[in-house]
Amino acid sequence: MKYVGLAYFTPEKFAAVAPEDVKKLVAQCPALDEKMRATGKVLVSASLGDLDSWRTLRPSNGKTQVNRWALHRGEGSRGRAVHHRGR
């Protein structure tokens, strides 16, 4: 069985974290990455980048359709991704 593990964060909340706390958190990453890779079960570890720059490419009638994704930040939202066609 194979799994995909996804992690995401809310940029506004992350920006509110004290710089020293961010450094402590980021400092843990290399050791944790190495521990997971040592199992031999991790194939890829990568960042998708900023949500505002996400794009999907799909074939449609012999052409490539490019779609933009954005994070919906409306009142009461939980930071869900919203698909915008044709942009």
Image (cartoon, rainbow, N blue to C red):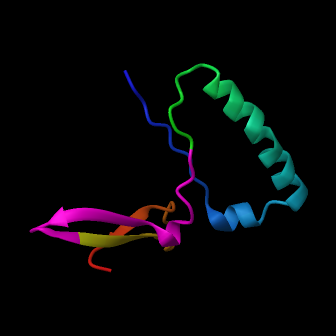
Residue 18: percent from left, percent from top: 86, 60
Vertical position of residue 42 compared to residue 29: above or below: above
Q: Quadrant of residue 34?
A: top right
Vertical position of residue 31 compared to residue 6: above or below: above
In the image, 61: left or right of 53? Answer: left
Residue under the point 72% across and 32% down: 32
Q: Quadrant of residue 3?
A: top left
Residue under the point 52% across and 56% down: 48
The quarter of the rendered structure image containing the N terminus is: top left
In the image, 65: left or right of 22? Answer: left
Residue 38: percent from left, percent from top: 65, 21
Residue under the point 49% across and 71% down: 53
Residue 66 belongs to magenta span: no
Residue 47: percent from left, percent from top: 57, 52
- The residue stretch that appears in magenta: 46-64
Residue nearest the viewer, comparing 69 with 45: 45
In the image, 38: left or right of 41? Answer: right
Residue nearest the viewer, comparing 8 with 31: 31
The quarter of the rendered structure image containing the C terminus is: bottom left
Residue under the point 74% across and 66% down: 15
In the image, 60: left or right of 34? Answer: left
**Residue farthest to the right, as pictured:** 20
